[in-house]
Amino acid sequence: MGSAAAGAPVRFLVSCVAADRSWADWTAWQLENAGLRVLVLEGNASIGPRTEPEQGERVIALLSPAYIESVQVLRPWWVMHQEDPEGLADTLVPVVVQPCRPEWPLSKVPYTDLTGLGEDEARARLLHAVGATPTGRAGPAASPPSFPDPAGRR
């Protein structure tokens, strides 16, 4: 896991669409509980008006059918890939939260698949994908958000 200038920790931006907000909340809580700085960006605010994340920021894109069908969300990724094809892999951490087939340019970056997993394994894979380990400290809320698995696996 990299770091920003002056030794500041990497900040993770969790990019999602409204339909996957429960996944974004769960993901953010898990990352904050591991001691990481996190900001959730929903919809076309995924990357904001700039064409790429600021130095030291990495984006966790929560991939689902709704995400990959959103032109507003994908347009910034197209721009980033065209401007810096190698930079996309350094910036983006794709995480599949619902079965889908990521298209270009998201298909150019290896992704972590959380579909069909119970909560414990999903947490472990998510933290591994960003190079973090659980700290065991108190999380950002009294209790974590519910795991958004429709089958209720833990």
Image (cartoon, rainbow, N blue to C red):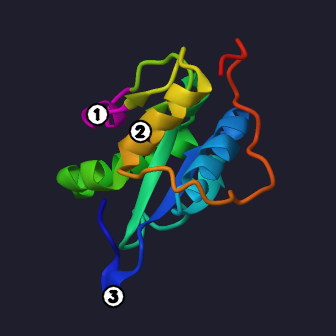
The label shown at residue 94 is 2
Give the magenta range. 103-111
The label shown at residue 8 is none
Left or right relative to 127: residue 44: right
Residues at discs 2 and 1 in contact (Cβ within 8 Å): yes
Residue 149 picture location, percent across and down:
68, 21
Residues at discs 3 and 1 in contact (Cβ within 8 Å): no
Q: Is residue 39 visible?
A: yes
Magenta part mainly helix, strand or loop? loop
Name which residue type carries label 2. Pro
Residue 129 picture location, percent across and down:
37, 42
Q: Is residue 18 visible?
A: no
| Rendered position, 97 above or below 28 | above
Q: Which residue is mark 3?
A: 6
Where disc 1 sits, the SS reads loop
Name which residue type carries label 1. Pro
The label shown at residue 110 is 1
Determine the residue located farthest toward the left in the rendered image. 86
Determine the residue located farthest toward the front in the rendered image. 136
Measure the alpha-carbon separation of dots 2 and 3.
27 Å
Determine the residue located farthest toward the bottom in the rendered image. 6
Q: Name the residue rendered at 35%, 50% in the picture.
A: 131
